[in-house]
Amino acid sequence: MAGQSEHIFKAYSEELQALDGLIARMGGMAEAQLAAAVKALATGDSELAQQTIRGDERLDELEQEVDEAVVRILALRQPMASDLRSVIAALRISADLERIGDYAKNIAKRSLPLWQTRQIETFNALPRMTRLVQAGIKQVLDAYLKRDAAAAVDVWERDQEVDEMYTGLFRATLTYMMEDPRNITSATHLLFIARNIERIGDHATNIAEVVHFMVTGERLEGARPKSDAANYAVVTPDDVEGSRGDEQE
C-alpha cells in the first residue's frame, strides 16, 4: 500500500512539474515572439515579420495544452492549498502569455506598413520601453518558476515606468502629427505599436500578481501602480476589429 501511495505521489509531482514546463515553454516562446516582432520593426525585415505572425499559432496550441493539463489535474488529483494555487496560476498565466503573443503578432503586422511610410523621429523612443517590458517578462517568468514573490512584486511596481514612457511617446508623436500631416499615417502605426508594447507590460504585471498570490496566498495590497494618462490612445474601427480577430484565433 505504501508503494502505491509513493507511486501516486510521484506521478502527481511529475504532473505539476510538467505543468511548470509548459508555462516555461510558453513564456520562452512569448519572449521570442516579442523579440522577433521588435527586430522586424527595427530592421524592416518583412520575412521575419511574417514568421512572427505565423508563430502565434504555436502559442495558442500550448495554451490549449495547459488548459487540458489543468483540467486533468483538477479532476484526478483534487489539489489543495498551495498546489491548487499553482494549478490555477498556470491556467491564468497561460492566458496572459497567449495575449502577449497576440500583441507581438500585432506589432509584426504593423511593422510592414510602417516601413512603407515616411519614418519619424519618435520611432527611436521605442527601444528603451521595449527593453523594460522584455526584462519584466523574463523576470516574472523566473519568479514563477522559482516561486519568488519578491521578484514578482518588483515587476508589479515597475509597470508605472512603462506607462510613463508610453505617455511621453504618445504626446511626442501627436506633436509630429500636428506639425506635419504627412506624418499621420506612420505616426498612427507607431502609436498602435507602442500601445501594444504597453499592453504587454500590463500582462506581465498581471502575471506578477498571480505569482504573488500563488506563493503567499495573499493578494497584493493597494492599487496597481499605473499612469492614468497611458489609458488614452487613438483607436480606429479597423483596429477594434483586428483585436477581436486575434482573440478569436
Image (cartoon, rainbow, N blue to C red):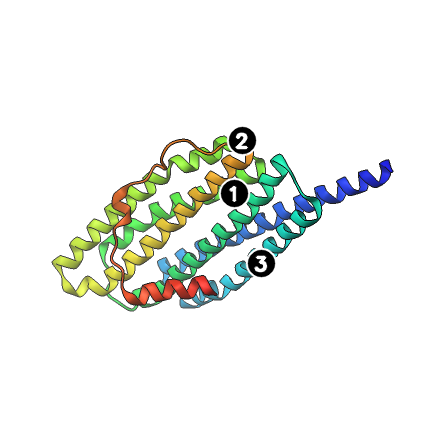
Distance in Å between CA atoms under marks 2 and 1: 16 Å
Q: Which residue position is annotated with label 3? A: 64
**Mark number for residue 141?**
1
Could you tell whether 240 is left or right of 13 in the image? left
Task: Say which quarter of the image contains residue 229.
Answer: top left
Mark 2 nearby-residue class (10 Å; few <14, some 14–19, many ≥20): some
- Say which residue label 2 marks: 216
What amino acid is labelled 2 in the image?
Thr
Picture residue at 21% right of the left edge, 54% below the top: 173
Could you tell whether 144 is left or right of 196 in the image?
A: right
> For the residue labelled by badge 3, is the local secondary structure a helix, a strand or a loop?
helix
Task: Tell me residue 178's x, y (percent).
Answer: 13, 58
Residue at 38%, 43% (x, y): give it.
Answer: 132
Numbered label attached to residue 77: none
Q: Earlier in the sequence, mark 2 or mark 3?
A: 3
What is the distance, in whole Å, between disc 3 and disc 1 at their CAs?
19 Å
Residue at 19% x, 54% y: name it. Answer: 174
Q: Secondary structure at mark 2?
A: helix
Task: Give how far apart the Cα atoms at labels 2 and 3 are.
Answer: 27 Å
Could you say whether the residue bearing mark 1 is in a helix, strand or loop? helix
User: Is 28 in front, or is 202?
Assistant: 202
Q: Amino acid at mark 1?
A: Leu
135 to the left or right of 186: right
| Viewer-nearest of discs 3 and 1 | 3
Mark positioned earlier in the residue sequence (3 or 1): 3
**If the image is split into quadrants, where does the N terminus sit?**
top right
